[in-house]
Amino acid sequence: VSGGAPPLDVPADVSPEAKKRFEQLATKMRGVYARFDQIDVPQGCDVADKSCDARWRKLADDLLELEDNSRYIIPVCKGSSESAKRFGERAQQHAEYVAQLKKKLDEEITSALAGGGSSAKKRWQEHQNEASRARPRVCLSFACGDWGEGVGERFDLILCNPPYVEAGAPLAAEVSDWEPAGALFAGADGLDS
């Protein structure tokens, strides 16, 4: 993949809270990148050949694990401080790099399946379905919004934490450095949401 992985270092000039977030991101990304390195696409082992089943099924399991490990890299809403913006940019860089790695992996799988025709694609889909059934996952998604503006889909449940802090109230640095003002302040008495 072009350019290599984004930096995993912690900038020296960030707050202790920001340092903790950069360290958590670096730890998570080291694990994700190590997992990519461990994935083995069975080249020269026909997916339709029963003797290759274990290798292809392992690949299907590994891909699900990789998906679980690499989701939620990006913070849903970026904060307004310089440290928070830098963190958001770094997380975005990692998400884009992971997308490149996934694309490359998909290309390797497509290449390995190329000679097997429709039966190979069907068997690969069966392996993926079996892996999914063996590893059920919660279907949950997050979105950043502005009171539903621009939301064009239905939901089973919406949870929100609207602004409730009175304008000008003093806040701890770990709040004011990471949360955008629009997520905190709600008028003179904190009730204008």
Image: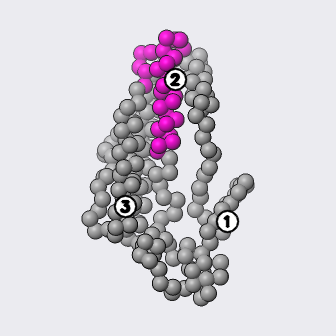
Asked which secondary structure carries label 2, the reply is helix
Q: What secondary structure is the magenta-colored segment mainly?
A: helix
Asked which secondary structure carries label 1, the reply is loop
- Residue 157 location, x and y as percent? 71, 57
Which mark, residue 148?
1
Alpha-carbon neighbours of circle 2 within 10 Å: few (<14), some, or many (≥20)? many
- Residue 169 location, x and y as percent? 51, 85
Q: Which residue is mark 2?
A: 57
**Lower sequence index among marks 3 and 1:** 3
- Residue 171 location, x and y as percent? 47, 80
Say whether residue 192 is magenta. Answer: no
Q: Nearer the viewer, mark 3 or mark 2?
A: 3
Structural distance between the alpha carbons of marks 3 and 1: 32 Å
Say whether residue 69 is magenta. Answer: yes
Q: How is the image coloured?
A: one colour
- The residue type indicated by label 3 comes to Lys
Structural distance between the alpha carbons of marks 1 and 2: 41 Å
User: Which quarter shows the C terminus?
Assistant: bottom right
Alpha-carbon neighbours of circle 1 within 10 Å: few (<14), some, or many (≥20)? few
Q: Are marks 3 and 1 in contact (CB under 8 Å)?
A: no
Residue 166's place in the image compared with 50, above or below, is below
- The residue type indicated by label 2 comes to Arg
Residue at position x 35%, y 56% from top? 23
- Residue 144 location, x and y as percent? 58, 62
Alpha-carbon neighbours of circle 3 within 10 Å: few (<14), some, or many (≥20)? few
